[in-house]
Image (cartoon, rainbow, N blue to C red):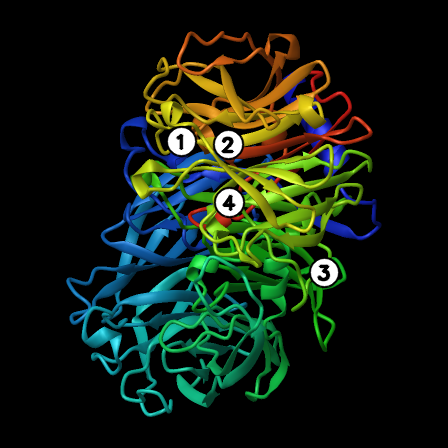
Amino acid sequence: MTPRLLAGLLATTTLVAGPAVAAPVFNRVATFETTQNLPEAERGSPTVSEIVSATEDGMTLVYTDSPGKRLGLIDIADPRAPKPAGVVALDGEPTSVKVVGGKAFVGVVTSESKANPSGHLAIVDLAGKTVEAKCDLGGQPDSVAVSPDKAHLAIAIENERDEEIDDGKLPQMPAGFLALLAVKDGVADCASLKRVDLTGLAEVAPEDPEPEFVAINGRNEAVLTLQENNHIAVIDLATAKVARHFSAGAVDLDKIDTEKDGKIELTGKIDGALREPDGVVWLDDSRFVTANEGDYKGGSRGFTIWNADGTVAWESGASLEYEAVSLGHYPDKRNKKGIEIEGVEAGIYGDDRLIFVASERASIVGVYKDTGAAPELLQVLPSGIGPEGVLAIPSRNLLVTANETDLVEDGGVRAHVMIYERTEGVAQYPTIRSASAGADTIPFGALSGLAADRTTAARLYAVTDSVYSAAPRILTIDAGKAPAEIVAATPVTRDGAAAEGLDLEGIATRADGGFWLASEGNPKKDVKNLLLKVAADGAILEEIELPEDLVKGATNYGFEGVTTVGSGDDEVVWLAIQRAWADDAPDETKLVAYTPASKSWGAVRYPLDKAAGGAWIGLSEITAAGDRFVLIERDNQIGGKAALKALTTVDAAAMKPAALGGDLPLVAKTVARDLIPDLEAFNGYVVDKVEGFAIDAAGDAYAVTDNDGVDDSSGETLFLKLGKDWAAN
C-alpha cells in the first residue's frame, strides 16, 4: 500500500465513520470489474455480472455474463484482492448458475425468438473450464436452484413474454414450467428430467405461467415465483407435483413518490399494488421471503416474509424505500415501481439469521436480522449499478453482489462484482443521510455545491443540480454527526413559487446573510448561466446574467461553483466556469469576478491539466479560504479510467480580475490534495463527480460527490471529512 493511499484511507475512514459499536457490521472490502477477466482487446464489448455463485470452500466466485455467452470466475482467496480466474465459453446466454462440488450447473438460453424458446442446462467442470455435458430443457431457463442435500436441481423455465407484442400483454405461449433433475455423484442426470405443469393455477393468465425464481428448503420443497401471474407455487420434489399455491396478493402504499417530475415528494398513493415477486429464498423450512419487484402491472416496492402455507408473516411496504430516499438513493426518473426490489438472499452468520434485500434501481442492499417477527434493519449497503445477484457466504463472513449494468456504450462505468466482509467495527456507509427515514424524510441527491456557515462549526449548506430542477433547494447539513445529517431543506423560490428550471452548481454564504447561488447554463437549451442573490429563506432577490461579450463564447459547460470575499461595497463574488469557452485556449478556463456594488465584471484565466484518451478536464468548485482559493479540478472519467480528482489552490494575491474583452492574467495553481485515494477508500469504483468543497468555521474541510440523482449511477454520495490538514498530501 502506498503512503498516499494509506493517508487517504486514514483521513476518510477515520473521520467519516460513525461511533464504534460492538455488533459486527458489513463493509465493502473489494470491487472486481468484470472486464478484468477479458483480454485487453475485448474489453470494449459489453460484459455483465448477473447471477453469482461460489465454490463450496467460498474461495472462487462464478458469475453469469449473458452478452458474453460465458461464465466468469474470480479468485477470492484474499477477498480484499480478488483476482481474475478466467472464463468458460457457453453455447448461449447464461441466466443462472449454481455450484456443487467442482461442477457449475448453468441455465443457458439458446432461443431463436421468444415465440420459439429453447435452452439447456450446461454442466461445467470448473477445474478444466469446460462444458462436460448439456441437458436439453425444452424451453428458456431462468433461475436454477440446488437442494440442500445436493440431490435435486430445479430450473424455472420462464419462456418469457415479448414486451414488443401487444404491449407485452399476457397470455403469450408457449407456457412456462418447472424442470426437475436428479443429481447423482455431483452430476445432473439428464434422463431424470421431469416437467411440473403450472397452468391453471393463477388468476392472472392461468394458461401462461411465467416462472421467475426458485429456491429449495430442507424438506425438498421448491418455492417458485410466477412473477407476471402474481402467484407463488410450492412443489414437492419427491412427487414432482404442486403441493400448494396461492396468489402473491397486493399491498396498499401511501406517502410514496409516484411522479417522474424532477422532485421527490412522498405524497402519492397506490392502492392494490400487486406484489409480482421476483427473487425468493427460504429462511427456514417453514418461511420464505420474496422480493416484490413487479414486471407486468405491479411492484409493491418492498419484500414479504411468508409462511409456507401462503399466509403473510410480515410485509415491508415502502419502509426500505424510505431508507433509500433518506440516503439519496431514490431514482425519481424511474419511479413507476420505485426502487424495484429484485433480489433476496439469506444466511446464518454466527447467531444471526440475516436477510439481504437488493434494490435494482436504488443500487442498495438492505441487511436485516430475522427476529421471527418484524425483521430488524441493521444496515444499508451501497452496491454497484443494478444489483441482480446476491450471495451469502457465511462460512467466510462474506457477502457478494453481482451488478449487471454496463455503461460501456455511453462511456460510463462497467459491470462489477462487489465483496463485503462482516467484522466487528464501524459501518463505513452511509457517509451522509437525512435525519429521519420515514414519510417525513428530507429527500436529496445530486449534491453539486457546498458552503460553510460563517459562524457555526460543522454547519454546511448544499444545493442539488438540474436532476431536481422542478424543486431546487438549499440543504442544511450537520457535519458534526457520523454520518453527517441533512437536517433542513429550504426551497429556492421565485415570486413565492418554486424557482423551476435552475441547474444549481454552486453555493456561497453572504456576509450580510443569505446566499449566492450559481446556476449553470446551456446555450443549446437556451438556458442562461445565472448568479442568484438569495435571501436566507430561499427567496431569489436578484437574478444576474453574464454580460453579452462573455456569453457569446459560452458552451454547455458553464458555472460550476461560487464563492465570495469581502463585504459591503468591497464584496466580490467569484464563479468558476467548468471548461474552455470559444474565446479560451483549449486547456484553460475562466474564473469570473462580479462586484455587486458596481455591477462590474472581470476575470482571470485558470490553467487546466491536459486530458487524454477521450476524457475532458474541468472545474467543479471554487472556495475562498483566507490567503488562497481552493478549486476542484477533475476529469470526467469513472472507475479504473479516473486519473484526476484533485483540490488545487491559487494564491488570493494573484486573483486580480482584468476587464472582460482584453488580455486576462493567467494564475498559477498548486495541487493541494489528490482525492482519488479518498474515493478509493470506500472500496467501490472511483466515482467521477467530486463537486463540492467547504471549510467550516473551525477550519475543518469537507468534500462531497454528486450522484447524478441515481441516473446511470450507483447512487452513492461520498461525504468526505478531510479535517484541518486537508492539504497535507
Quick one: 666 or 48, which is closer to the camera? 666
Query: Which residue appears at 25% of the width and 79% of the height?
Result: 169
* Picture coordinates of residue 231, whole percent (x, y): 43, 84
Query: Given contact means CB atoms under 8 Å apart, are the residues at marks 3 and 2 in contact?
Result: no
C-alpha separation, residue under disc 1 versus residue under disc 2:
8 Å
Marks 4/3: CA–CA distance = 22 Å
Q: Amino acid at mark 1?
A: Tyr
Q: Where residue 35 sits in the image (x, y, percent)?
A: 38, 36
* Residue linked to disc 4: 465
The percent position of residue 467, horizontal first and vertical second, equals: 47, 50
Q: Nearer the viewer, residue 592 or 545?
A: 545
- Residue that mark 2 sits on: 560
Which residue is the site of mark 1?
557
Q: Type of residue at label 4?
A: Asp
Please report whichever mark, 1 or 4, sits nearer to the chain's N-terminal start: 4
Q: Which is closer to the viewer, label 3 or label 1?
A: 1
* Residue 573 coordinates in the image, percent (x, y): 60, 26
Q: Which mark is residue 436?
A: 3
Q: Tell me the mark number nearer the camera, choosing from 4 and 3.
A: 4
Instruction: From the viewer's perspective, tell me whether residue 261 is left or right of residue 199.
Output: right
The earlier-in-sequence mark between 4 and 2 is 4
Which residue is rendered at x = 59% and y = 59% of the image?
325
Q: Which mark is residue 203?
A: none
Contact between marks 1 and 4 (CB within 8 A): the answer is no
